Image (cartoon, coloured by chain):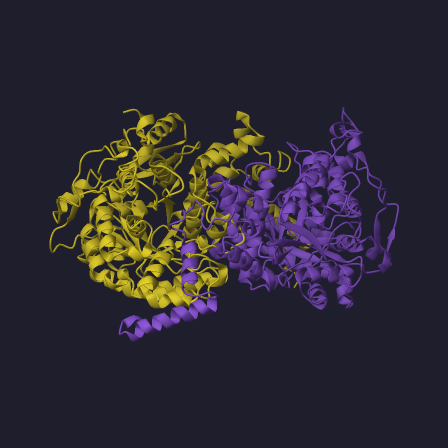
Chain colours: A purple, B yellow
Amino acid sequence: MTNKDARTPASVQDEKSEEAGKSIGWHKAYIEGTRPDLRVPVRQVHLTNGQSVTLYDTSGPYTDPLVDTDVRRGLSPLRENWIITRGDTEEYAGRPVRPEDDGIKHTSPRGGLRNLDAVFPGRPRQPRRGREGQAVTQLAYARRGEITPEMEYVAIRENVAPEVVRDEIAAGRAVLPANVNHPEIEPMIIGKRFLVKVNANIGNSAVTSSIEEEVEKMTWATRWGADTVMDLSTGRNIHTTREWVLRNSPVPIGTVPLYQALEKVDGRAEELTWEIYKDTVIEQAEQGVDYMTVHAGVRLAYVPLTANRKTGIVSRGGSIMAAWCLAHHKESFLYENFEELSEILAAYDVTYSLGDGLRPGSIADANDEAQFAELRTLGELNRIAKRFNVQTMIEGPGHVPMHKIKENIDLQQEICDEAPFYTLGPLTTDVAPAYDHITSGIGAAMIAWWGTAMLCYVTPKEHLGLPNRDDVKTGVITYKIAAHAADLAKGHPGAQEWDDALSDARFEFRWEDQFNLALDPDTAREFHDETLPAEPAKTAHFCSMCGPKFCSMKISQDIRREHGGTRTEIEEGMALKSKEFAASGNRVYLPIAD
Amino acid sequence: MTNKDARTPASVQDEKSEEAGKSIGWHKAYIEGTRPDLRVPVRQVHLTNGQSVTLYDTSGPYTDPLVDTDVRRGLSPLRENWIITRGDTEEYAGRPVRPEDDGIKHTSPRGGLRNLDAVFPGRPRQPRRGREGQAVTQLAYARRGEITPEMEYVAIRENVAPEVVRDEIAAGRAVLPANVNHPEIEPMIIGKRFLVKVNANIGNSAVTSSIEEEVEKMTWATRWGADTVMDLSTGRNIHTTREWVLRNSPVPIGTVPLYQALEKVDGRAEELTWEIYKDTVIEQAEQGVDYMTVHAGVRLAYVPLTANRKTGIVSRGGSIMAAWCLAHHKESFLYENFEELSEILAAYDVTYSLGDGLRPGSIADANDEAQFAELRTLGELNRIAKRFNVQTMIEGPGHVPMHKIKENIDLQQEICDEAPFYTLGPLTTDVAPAYDHITSGIGAAMIAWWGTAMLCYVTPKEHLGLPNRDDVKTGVITYKIAAHAADLAKGHPGAQEWDDALSDARFEFRWEDQFNLALDPDTAREFHDETLPAEPAKTAHFCSMCGPKFCSMKISQDIRREHGGTRTEIEEGMALKSKEFAASGNRVYLPIAD
């Protein structure tokens, strides 16, 4: 089987080898936990002054030159032994995969997968689920007071005590999405007590994109810092694309099962049934999806509340459920069957992401009756989920002007018992299509500062088309900025060390360190080199922005050099001279005239 | 003289003609005031549904196909008649232009301008200043209760009563920068009661860039929405570059005279004198600079306060003044001569922009003693300036984490008697060189919401190099987003109409309207066309993002179509059906379980 014919995502692998050859000023390191198979990856940046800085790393084994990754084999199942050792899950035959799972109708003139070679060729596996009567979720363990290896792993990652992780999960203030069928992930946690996380959406649509591209986008997104990835595929090969993504993903994968369910009824919302939906959820849970967006808060009664909106219902899931409710004049089958659904999710430790199907799609619709009515229902559903030990987070808007953002997080925290809030943006204006990563990055930073636990990225293509590789990168970097700005504003312990290290490098003209510490070293280096490309410029005490004469940092350094060696000396020297000056009768030290 | 040889900015002109030929869905219109020579430009966007939307327009005569512009002649002096009619200014011989003004030393082996043809060829003009004993500034007029044509102009632009403009200027809460030697500008106002404004910096440095490029960047920046432009040139031809920029600029031009003064002493800060500085200020005031950044708040006593900072002094002007103060162990000559300086500025109606030379250059240094000590001095200087009828705004930081931003604007407003705040960003994290338009766009939106009147843009090249044309555009668009998001959050009357018009277009799949209403129509159209390039796609009821089956807006519209015609009908229809449903005994309308 050649790569070209098979349409497999081999390019991901090629790219990794390419990068491994580059000198990049940092390497992948691991912090060991209490057991040898618990090794938490970090990005160790080596500075030219001999120091090093340790950064959180989401890029998975792909950036470890010692690990031989192969997208056709999948990542090694890091958590498998932990899951098996717990002894509360069991393998079973599982639901047979059907052509319809990939959107192939037997009535289709060109039946069968477009290319059978696309089927994931990795090791055969059987799905796993909780044994009868066993509560296998991380929430159940936390409530029982137990610290799982997953909890210890995230404690090391977040630099907090494992008990903090356990307690936050037990209280429902944090989730650790980790399906027992996704042993490949490096555990991570989502909660306001921890670092703000970023989700990147990928997914083909009926119009464009292939399996290969989606797997590549996933590894690309995690390389730049995506903490989770949602596969929102809606076109063909939806099951198979997901399998490739899951088997190769070092981060939790989220989905919206409703999209695939709708494909199974050929896009006719009114033909959806609870049975088809449930079958899809089981299919995806068996594959290993870590969290699922469920639009169970879109109740029949709320649909009329959207009638006078400027932009109606803008959530795909929300509009599908609204169409179903109206077509049948019945309450949502998701709302009606929420307890059964919770039972299913609990068996696999799939985390709920309760979708905000009625989120505002324009500034005009922000914080309206429809939106908050649904939020109250999500609060109700959150409590039901918790009864079944299902970890739960709550999705949030959308388009919201700045002065209405805080109300969203405050209300969500109150109504949903502090369950993690997971917001899309919000976009703070409607007028900038092609720049909605920025309109929303503004809102994202603010809402994260005020307590949102995870931010769903928005790319420059929002409202216009499907993001390509560059858009994915731009979206992730923008949202890493928003998340880190929020970590700083929340005073997250250690967050500022990164800024300090970069600012020290900047002040001391350690250009290479400045690049290597940057969120995007490649672009920083490229921009610098555009106007000052020569190697000596990398040690120059200025850049092309101001030139040598006007470099304030250089002047500032010269001042220090002239007036003493260490900072303390400078201060004493300057203070002394200034005191002499004051003593000379000048009014420098007089209180400021007022 | 051919364009190529002359190094004149002819390409600006060419580009305009090119654009005039394009169908762009909007045209330049004018709103007339109480006199025929008072015509306020607006951008009239024509929608496909027959409606039109009027937007604020900063692009000047360049976007008016009926105006024949020529950068070699300069713009026509719109305000000349108003200024002459007031009768309180007079022309005079003015200061002779010297080679040193362009950084040419008589000792230089290659004396003379690099290219004499670069000298601005437009109509000869003599400088103008206030007659002895006359208070000619807009502030003086406002205080006397008079409404100048400039005030009426901005009142129309801002859609408020002229009295509001006059009163805000009189109270010192707003400035209308309009040097009597810059009659070409279309008046605009900066104050928290008005639309948030954006400044774009241009300027060559010793390392790179030409006159031609700078004039092009100026027209380019105003085309995308820059309300003022600062010419921060520090290299050669600094006087001549400024002349070209001024004669062709429809927006107020700001400068930092200290940069040119330093060039005159060959970059040796300690050789600066009050006389050289004053001479430079007069030179620039005679040319028509509308506002000047003056770092008079960097006092000798504050320099030691920066010694323990992570990044010392990062303002060029601040570091130059600090170096001067320490070299001489004397109080700043700007602080000492501030009254005389104010007298000069008053004669030309140059507006002060009191510089924050000690602004923080890193997260670690935000809101420190040095920064706030200087701010208190700026408050003191603001009161002196007002005694001389000089319009004044106050510059602000810098690098500030989100939780420390509000303190900046609150303190500034208190200390500086509500004088307009003019901030650079602030940048909310240090870790993203190459994305500092975004790190700072977040802070800019927030601080503008809380009362900052004008935002100085930051481009992706910040900290790395000199912005090119693309960077200028990205910086301006990012800051227009921040400014408009703030206008929305402040509830500025009419601000939301723009968002509403775009959202209506979006919901109704009027793609062309959506593009034409966008802050950047070209990029929005380009992004859409990347995946769905065909013309029919412009009327399609979906885009490649979700494809036809999953388009929530389409489903939302279908729902409305099925359940009634107008929105009211839909609501009634849905409400009726829902009531029937409720009556059937289902628990849809029960209060939410709690």
The front one of B229 and B59 is B229
For residue A284, which quarter of the picture?
Answer: top right
The front one of A520 and B313 is B313
> Where in the figure is residue B333, as x and y percent of width and height?
26, 61
For residue A11, which quarter of the picture?
Answer: top right
> Where in the figure is residue B310, as x and y percent of width and height?
48, 62
Left or right: where A446 falls relative to A333? left
- All told, the count of numbered labels is 0
Q: Compared to A519, does B512 lie above or below?
A: above
Is the C terminus of chain B in the top left, top right, bottom left or bottom right quadrant? bottom right
| Residue drawn at point x = 38 percent, y = 28 percent | B19
Is the N terminus of chain B in the top left, top right, bottom left or bottom right quadrant? top left
| Residue drawn at point x = 39 percent, y = 51 percent | B455
The front one of B463 and B539 is B463
* Residue B389 makes an appearance in the image: no
> Where in the figure is residue A175, as x and y percent of width and height?
69, 58
Left or right: where B459 falls relative to B239? right
Q: Compared to A556, does A530 lie above or below?
A: above
Left or right: where A131 falls relative to A217? right
The front one of B215 and A532 is A532
Q: Compared to B92, does A1 lie above or below?
A: above
> Where in the figure is residue A325, as x and y percent of width and height?
66, 45
* Residue A473 makes an appearance in the image: yes
